[in-house]
Every structure is written in structure tokens, then in C-alpha cells.
Image: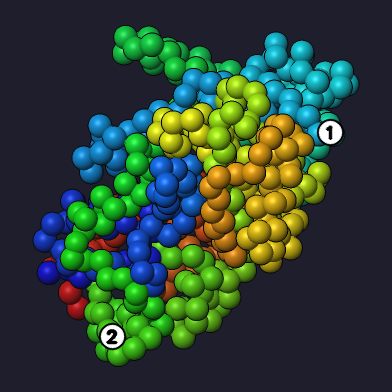
């Protein structure tokens, strides 16, 4: 019987173990998690009728893996799509005012986000020549080169803030947004790339006799993403062991295989080991096995994020809240990065007569925010909402969730680091690395990589246990 140990019971580890269990029912799979619950940053608080996500607020169907995972796990009827307004209306906080994000060339021309020079520079992107070298490039440099300074200062900053809460001058474009880099390579222009992709999507939908979906939809589950975590954990019981802190990963002396050691006297023998926990924990576990490998993994930086959930009486919040929410670009250095109008995005997120707003604070340039006490944080976010949205009274509900190491940052050189790590791993057959520190920070990226890695683990075990592999 093949033995597999997965270290980390976040979405990456759970989905990978679930896929392995389905494709290798005869294998022995053990999932070790240091915390007292599964899920990692993906968890949902349900209190006083409010449903607050501690981490991701949903997933797009631009990649099918997460939605398919939900359906395969029996959660198809629990899937809910974000409201049409949330998909259509998103805002930026600029000069103290909310301005709608453009949804196309027409709305861009009418938008006040960019001046006329900035608009023309952005629209001229399709006529600029493509880059000929393959050197790594920051998101900021890429957007300035292709679309101009205003687009970089406003739109790129907002995009990076909303996804990475990072610095576009430090983050690698091909690592963070490989699709944009590919559009330039293949089509000579990002705008042309989007246009050609849309044509292909329309043609494929027409051939299938389906309506054309203009953009990806955002999805969640009725009870929050915690439903997915709890469902996968239930499928995997009793394979999951909580409260287990792994100390080291070592090779079994004199024969193939691995030994996973806990902080106590626990030991787990494995034919394959998959680390899906955060990169800094992976580095600690591998320090005795391979110092250079551990050091390269430890180089991956993380930012700090605080989630502040606030519930208000609907009568105390002016405006329609007809949309997803707003982003405050990091260059503004405000006390929040953005606010999601959770009860407008999904149904059932707040009791009748109330609204739930979720603020994200901190990020790469505001590490100080993490040290504020809860009262200070709640008051700071409330003050911002008073100024921006005209909130008339104090919240009736609040929760603060701190993530000291929240989102991995794919800085310049990230792809080179990944190539080095992949090459180094060839020295350690049966050891696999996964998680959002490597090839995508979104929920979809985690489930997609988990599917691919489950196949790789299965193929490795089949090959290593074949008769020809003995000796």
C-alpha cells in the first residue's frame, strides 16, 4: 500500500488529498495540520446572523477547478453566484470620492479616473511594439511601458492592491499575471490578446449552443467557503490529524521513502510527501534535509493584512450599495486597502435590515496597521466609511482578523527562483511542494495546482513501485 503524507490542511492540501483519495483509493493518505482546524486562511465566521469570510471571498469560474471540486464533493446545490451588480459595479477611491471602474472602451472614455492623455495612452496600447527580450519585469514597468504613467499609477496600483495588497514596483508581471505577458508575446498587445480570447470564447459558446458569458463569474457557497473546507475534511476523515506541528522531513536511511517527524515523538513513514503549508514553514521543515533549498523557499516574502468586518443597520448606510465595493490604491496610504459590500455580493450575508461590510487593511506599505488594537482598527475603518459612504452610526457588529503573513509576494526574480527550486527537487524524488507561495495566490490557483500535483504524485508512485523500478 502506497503511503502519502500531506503537510497542511488548507485548501491546497485538502483538495490535493481529496483528488488523491479518489484516484488512488487503495493508498494510505495522511494529512497533518498544525492548527486546531482545517482551512488555513479559508474559513468563515458565522455570528449573530452575519457570515464573514476570514480570507478569500469567493472564486472565479475563469478556471473550472474550484467549481468542479465543489460539485464533485456534493456541494453543487450550495453554490451561489455573485449578484449582477457586484460583477458590474466596482469602484476606486480617488481624491476622497468613489469613481466607477471602467468596464470597456466606452466607459473608459467617460471615466474621470484618467485624464485625456492617460486615456489616449491606454487606448494606444494595441499599436505599441512588443518587447523582444525575456527579462523579468515589474507590473509597474510593464503597464508604464505599454499603457502609460497614469494607467500605472491608478489602474495597476488598484489591480495589485485588490489581489496581492502588494507593491506593483516590486511584483513580477510574468509571475503574477502570466496571461498578460503571454498576450504581449502572442498578440503583440494586451488589448489584442483580450479581444482574440473573447472571439474564441464566443465561437466556442456558439458551437456548443450556449449563451456567451461576457466575463468570469464570482462564486461562493451559501454558508461561506467554510462549507468546502468542512466538506473536504469530512470526506478525508480519519486521515486528517489536527494540532500536529511537523518538525522535519528526512529520507529513510538505506532505502527509498521519507520520514515525517512531529515536534513530539510522532513519526510518519511515507513513499511521497507533499508540503502545502506556507513557504516559511516549508523552509523550516526542510532545513535539515537541504539547506540551500530551504533558504530559497524562505526568500518568498509575505505581507500583512487585517480583515475588519463591520455590520451596520441598513438605515444607517446611505446609498444603494449596488456593487462589489471599492479599492483604495496603496499610493494613497489610507487606513484601508478596500471594502467589500459583502451583503450586496451574496445573499444571506447579513440579517434582514442590516448590511455587512468587510475592510482589508495593512498590505505591503502599511505594516503598522497590524499592531493597532481592535478598537483603534474598528474606529479607523468606521471613520473611512463615514467619509466615503456617509455611514451615520457606529456598527452593531464587528470582528477583527489578523494575518501576520497573509499573501505571498511574487517579487522580481520569482520565476527564476521557482525554476531553481524545481531543479533542486530532482535530488529528492518523492518530495513535492505546493501551496499559494509558488504559482498563484487565488483559490482557483490552489485547486488547479492541487489537481496537477495529485496526478504527478500518482504517476511518481506508479513508476517508483513498478517491478522495473525495484533495485
Q: Quadrant of the N terminus?
A: bottom left
Quarter of the rendering containing residue 331: top right
Residue 368: x %, y % from top left: 74, 63
Residue 80 pos. (x, y %): 36, 30
The residue drawn where x is 50% and y is 82% is 287
SS state under label 1: loop
Q: Find disc 2 in the rendering and name its residue.
A: 266
Label placed on residue 95: 1
Q: Is residue 70 left or right of residue 176?
A: left
Query: Residue 410, how many percent across, how many down?
Result: 62, 54
Residue found at x 73% / y 42%: 384
Q: Up-down: is 72 above or below 233?
A: above
Q: Is residue 185 above or below residue 85?
A: below
**In terms of secondary structure, where does tag 2 sit?**
loop
Image quarter (top left, top right, bottom left or bottom right) of the C terminus: bottom left
Give me the residue at 70% from left, 32% from top. Answer: 389
Q: Is residue 179 visible?
A: no
Disc 2 crowd rating (10 Å Cα; few below 14, some 14-19, many 20+) is: few
- Taking depth in this image into account, of 353 and 387 the one nearest to the observer is 353
Amino acid at each position: 500500500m502506497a503511503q502519502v503524507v500531506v503537510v497542511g490542511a488548507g485548501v491546497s492540501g485538502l483538495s490535493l488529498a481529496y483528488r488523491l483519495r479518489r484516484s488512488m483509493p487503495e493508498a494510505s493518505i495522511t494529512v497533518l495540520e498544525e492548527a486546531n482546524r482545517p482551512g488555513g486562511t479559508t474559513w468563515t465566521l458565522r455570528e449573530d446572523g452575519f457570515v464573514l469570510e476570514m480570507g478569500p471571498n469567493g472564486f472565479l469560474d475563469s478556471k473550472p477547478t474550484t467549481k468542479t471540486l465543489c460539485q464533485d464533493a456534493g456541494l453543487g446545490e450550495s453554490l451561489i453566484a455573485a449578484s449582477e451588480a457586484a460583477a458590474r459595479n466596482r469602484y476606486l477611491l480617488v481624491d476622497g470620492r468613489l469613481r466607477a471602474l471602467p468596464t470597456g472602451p466606452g466607459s473608459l472614455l467617460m471615466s474621470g479616473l484618467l485624464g485625456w492623455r492617460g486615456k489616449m495612452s491606454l487606448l494606444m496600447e494595441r499599436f505599441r511594439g512588443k518587447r523582444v527580450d525575456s527579462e523579468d519585469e515589474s507590473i509597474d514597468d510593464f503597464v508604464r511601458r505599454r499603457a502609460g504613467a497614469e494607467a500605472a499609477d491608478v489602474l495597476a496600483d488598484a489591480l495589485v492592491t485588490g489581489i496581492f495588497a502588494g507593491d506593483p514596483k516590486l511584483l513580477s508581471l510574468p509571475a503574477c499575471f502570466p496571461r498578460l505577458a503571454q498576450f504581449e508575446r502572442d498578440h503583440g498587445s494586451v488589448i489584442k490578446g483580450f479581444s482574440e480570447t473573447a472571439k474564441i470564447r464566443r465561437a466556442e459558446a456558439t458551437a456548443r449552443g450556449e449563451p456567451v458569458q461576457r466575463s468570469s463569474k464570482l462564486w461562493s457557497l451559501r454558508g461561506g467557503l467554510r462549507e468546502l473546507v468542512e466538506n473536504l475534511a469530512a470526506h478525508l476523515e480519519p486521515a486528517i490529524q489536527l494540532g500536529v506541528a511537523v518538525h522535519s522531513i528526512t529520507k529513510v536511511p538505506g532505502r527509498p521513502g521519507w520520514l515525517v517527524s512531529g515536534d513530539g515523538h510522532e513519526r510518519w513513514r511515507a513513499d511521497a510527501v507533499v508540503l502545502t503549508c506556507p513557504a516559511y514553514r516549508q523552509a523550516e521543515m526542510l532545513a535539515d534535509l537541504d539547506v540551500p533549498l530551504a533558504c530559497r523557499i524562505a526568500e518568498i516574502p509575505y505581507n500583512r493584512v487585517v480583515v475588519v468586518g463591520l455590520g451596520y443597520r441598513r438605515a444607517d448606510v446611505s446609498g444603494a450599495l449596488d456593487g462589489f465595493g471599492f479599492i483604495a490604491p496603496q499610493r494613497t496610504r489610507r487606513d484601508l486597502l478596500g471594502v467589500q459590500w459583502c451583503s450586496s455580493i451574496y445573499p444571506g450575508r447579513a440579517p434582514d435590515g442590516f448590511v455587512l461590510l468587510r475592510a482589508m487593511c495593512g498590505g505591503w506599505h502599511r505594516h503598522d496597521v497590524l499592531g493597532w488594537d481592535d478598537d483603534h482598527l474598528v474606529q479607523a475603518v468606521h471613520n473611512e466609511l463615514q467619509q466615503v459612504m456617509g455611514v451615520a452610526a457606529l456598527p452593531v457588529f464587528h470582528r477583527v482578523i489578523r494575518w501576520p503573513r497573509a499573501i505571498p509576494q511574487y517579487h522580481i526574480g520569482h520565476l527564476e527562483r521557482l525554476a531553481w527550486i524545481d531543479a533542486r527537487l530532482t535530488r529528492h524524488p518523492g518530495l513535492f511542494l505546493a501551496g499559494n507561495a509558488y504559482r498563484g495566490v487565488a483559490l482557483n490557483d490552489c485547486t488547479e495546482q492541487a489537481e496537477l500535483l495529485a496526478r504527478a504524485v500518482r504517476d511518481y508512485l506508479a513508476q517508483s513501485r513498478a517491478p522495473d523500478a525495484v533495485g
